[in-house]
Amino acid sequence: MKSIYQALVDIVDAEHASDRPEELYIYSFDLGTAEPHRPDYVVAPRTTGQVQEIVRLANREKVPVVPLGGGLSLAGLAVPLRGGILVDLKRMDSILEVNERGRYAVLECGVSQAQLTSYLARHHPRLTHSEPGAPPTATVAGNVLIHGQGDLAQPYGFNSDQINGLEVVLPTGEVCRFGSCAIGVSWFTNHPLPDVGLFFGWCGTTGIVTRLSIRLYPAKRIRGVGQFVVEDEELVPEIIGKITATQMAEDVIAYSRAIPPFGLGLQHFTVNIAADSEKELEFKQELIWDDTLGEYISRGDGGYLGFTRGLEHPQISKTSDYKKGGGFEYVGSIMPIEKYPECYRKGREISERHDIPYTVTGRCIGVGHSMMFAWTYAFNRADPETMNQARKALHETDDLVLELGGVIWKPGTYGQQLIIDRLDPGTRELMRRIKAVLDPGGIMNPGNWEGI
Amino acid sequence: MFALQFDEDKCLRCEGQDCLAKCQYIHSEPGGAGKEMVKIARGEDSFVLHECVTCYGCEEYCPMGNHPFYLIVERQEVLGISPVPRPLIKRAVNLGVPFRGEPAAKEINGPVLNMAAFSELTPLIQGKLFEGLPVISTDGRKMFHYFCQLMYLHYGRSSIINERLPGIIATIERHRPTKVVCFHDECYGTYASYCPAVGIDVPFTPIHFYEYLYDRLTQLKELIRPVGLKVAYQRPCSSRLSPDKHLFVGEIFRLIGAEEVRREYVDENALCCGGTIQGQRREGSRKRAAGIQNRNIEDMKKAGAEVCVFNCPACLQTLGGMVAREGIRPVHMSDLCRFAIGETPAGWEVTR
Amino acid sequence: MPMDTYEFNDVIHRCFRCGYCKFPTNWMDVNNCPPYARFRMEPYSCGGRLWLTRAWLNEALDWSEHLAEILYSCTTCRNCEVKCPLSFNADIVNMVVAARSEMIEQGKVPRAVKKFLENIDLHGNPYGSGRSKRNAWMEGTETQGYNGQEHLYYVGCTGSYDTRAQKSARALGMLLGKAGVSFGVLGNEENCDGNEVHKLGETGLFEMLAQGNIEHFNSLGAKKIITLSPHAYNAMKNLYPRYSGDFQVFHYTRLLLELIKEGRLDVSGGFDAQVTYHDPCFLGRWNEEYETPRRILTALPSLRLVEMDKNRDAALCCGGGAGNFEIDLLGGSNSSPARRRVRQAAETGATVLAVACPKCLVMLEDALKAEELEGKLAIKDIAEILAEAGGIQ
């Protein structure tokens, strides 16, 4: 009888299937504080057909399947908690279609953020997508599936709200399509067909998304970032409310951090503004800085730091070096914006108690409908005690999120349990039934949404 | 502890009242300057304290060497009239806090070049112009140990300068320099103008960067090939603290064969880059800064400038992109000098 | 454990595996780290390699041939150093080389690496060919032996022994002769420059080679050295000074540009073709020389220079560095960096892919055949292009 390893080699090829210690070692890690767990096999498929065969094999052999995109969830969502077959999806990285008129792109699941940004800049410079703050190796699909948010969150919402359709390999190996593509027309709309919501936020337990259609948005010729700063954190919610009411900004973020020192004890805002002409740019700037925020400036409560043209790729990796230790992890939450001051104060207190320079960030989603608030904890990978401190701080912060009235975003197993404990019983029962129907063998990323 | 040597009588005797008469940003009654300065010296409020945009110009205009700008800043702080909003002050004060360990102080016992808070521009310092000149403050993580602090004049915080400067001088002194060539002329202004004005002792001789460049270019004269470029100079505010060194700008241009275009906003009449003005509390500051910047750049364009030469990295950061968008190439003075002696400047791809 | 004496033991844990190192400077894909482009499995990415190396040095992972191949698959192209946003980025290749030294110290290297190093030690070249054959490329040329001329023309192992690369060595010799440059070669007395040996972590052998060459050049009174290969250029310019090897070293493109400007090389014949240029890592990212070769090409009448999307510091390495032109850990697939590069060149519509390195020449020529693009695209060294333009055969 063929071994699982040989079966995987037969599905892909010998170079893209492995049971060797080196692959098992590397693929056992999340980049944050989550404990590593070894897979039994690693496989990197190239086609949807290969993904199907892998899933069918896993069902036959009753081994877990763990889908991996960029591996940057920093919540251990692609750590093989029960071993099994780790499926590295990044070889499926073709950009299949960009429709300029309909403003959408159809991508394979392994397309990275930077690959898409770069492709659009070169071939479709009048279009852009909502790029998150993760390192640009993060996959577009992975970010969508965890309800990520990017630099167009303020006008257009979560990245998971920007989907026209999906192709999914179910845990039992069938391929399904959702959205207009399911009835054989182009991938231009999700509504009014039945929901794609069976796969967002499910931490890979309900299937493997192999293709998706995402909405694109107008890329104006001039894009840049303006900065504002206040000292009093209580002013942050009202300022965000006022900026968003102008409907002139693309991305609004408030943050505070201990390093570098100029950020300590201050609340900085970055406000992305885009325009097709100098006239439009000046109009928007006048509306935001002069008409809306002018009162804070003349009272001396708020300072304008200028507008810089051009958008850079996220430099979030630098946070990993705060403790000169190659590591950080953060608790992300979806919070009411009015909670910003408390989030800041309590988060700062947790950081300082664990001897970690504090970093907090709030990204506005929708027109002030909520914010993604993150508390970041750096650690030194060569010093287990700092990892311990970071882990404790993270768990405390998970508790804090719910205490403050927010929802944990992309929860790891610790946060998942906190949510399960609070879930409406009817909802919990429905989730259990969905999981059982879609994944009767219990092979899809087990350990996640466990005990639902 | 340190006190500004300000003499009221000098203001009262002054005929020209140039500090306000020549000010490009405050409108005042003719002959009213002396009265206002005396009011300020006596601790009273004055419209000058509220309308000053901190361009440093009056330090140059004052024929009596009476330091009107330093007085304005001191009094703004005492009266709680800061030109910028409080969060910007806090940010700036935090910015200058050195947060990485002490720098290694190699003893040099000779002339040095001090990069101060601009360690990241050390790549500009290479080639024959700087051969044999040791450079200090080259580590970006520790550069705030060498930061001259004078930036806080823009924030109405003389107290921070007076508090921190002795420590900065002590750090520089540990290198045992005889002369300190100051990369940024604000550092030069600190040690040659501000320190004497408030009585801070400076145990080395500050050398203006342009004086150094001019002398070195003269030594390397045979290597100079005329650059043949039409240049405009963006005079930084800090240059007003060393007007006696401003002549080196023209001297260097002549030496390297750069044609300085004839502009309206030049020398005493030069315009501030607007970098600090845009964030000031006074209503309309953002537009005021933009207006100044537009006038400045239009003036360069009208005069036919191909290149805009900078000394101050902050001016370069504020205006560099803007001048480039108007087809004028921004370049640092030392890069232009390196180009003149046939070297490839660090920040500029040479195509000729 | 080996980590205790590892030179970068205070740095290697700082890699976050954010993956920036997979991208070129223009961010267009994740295929700019040659081994990762080849295998697309995380252990082969720069971050994966560093994490595995750290695990091995900490004795959390046993040595295996597979681990060693992962470590030796790095071609030291420096793309990772250019892309990594963290402050230790300048030491990434050094970390790989230091780990290789550790493996060599333990006598545990892939078989092909062992052979490569042994050949250089015994025969002065990685191919294992006899020293007496090193000057075979000179046959029929007017190139003279070095005897106190102004320049020493250092050919290098690939230019001397590889039949394809010999053509570029001959072309350069002819150009220098035509321009009246005073130069000579070492012929059979030439020994390996050691750049690949250094990158493979064999510091002992490298020192021997470097010191031997320095002594040899000094004894001949050679002061100015022209190299055919950017690898030799890198070694002699950047590494030999550590052993008091103080020479004026030029990659040949620098000299050829001056000769064109001075009118000593006639290029009026032109070169009527659409040409794209591949930046060699040891001239480009290692020594920041991107423009001189392009200025040579654009000086030729009728030559139309087009750029690949990945050009200058975004160039994709041909996969030949750190000995891989012979050790060949990255071949055998259409995902190999050389085959990817040749496809990128063909996409520009160019009919000629110009190179300035004999290793790139050999790697890309082999890839051309594998891609079945012969007849549609030709690989030519800049010296060969100039020789054609000048009517020199």
Image: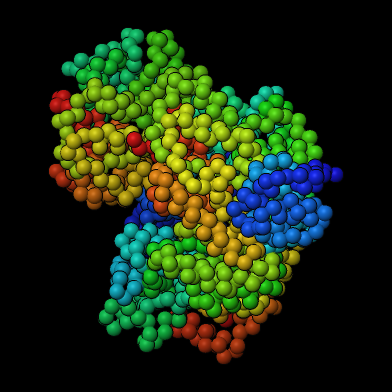
Q: Nearer the viewer, residue B9 or A52?
A: B9
Taking A424 as reference, is A42 above or below it? above
B51 displayed left or right of C204: right
**Residue C249 horizontal/vertical position (percent):** 40, 23
Q: Nearer the viewer, residue B175 or A257?
A: B175
Taking B73 as reference, is C203 above or below it? above
Taking B301 as reference, is A253 above or below it? below
C317 displayed left or right of B101: left
**Residue A400 horizontal/vertical position (percent):** 69, 73
Q: Quadrant of residue C324?
A: top left
A354 displayed left or right of A36: right
Q: Which of C103 and B278 is in front in this view?
A: B278
**Residue A73 horizontal/vertical position (percent):** 53, 65
Report the colour scheme.
rainbow
**Residue A148 horizontal/vertical position (percent):** 50, 71
Q: Quadrant of residue A115?
A: bottom left
Count how many numbered circles sit on residues in the image: 0
Q: In which quarter of the image is residue B225?
A: top left
Furthest-bottom residue in view? A426
Q: In which quarter of the image is the C terminus of chain C?
A: top left
Residue at 78%, 52% (x, y): give it: B38
C90 displayed left or right of C252: right
Q: Quadrant of the N terminus of chain C?
A: top right
**Does the image show residue B83?**
no
Residue at 42%, 46% (x, y): give it: B303
**Does the image show residue B40?**
yes
Residue at 66%, 54% (x, y): give it: B30
Taking B245 as reference, is A305 above or below it? below
Residue at 64%, 51% (x, y): give it: B21
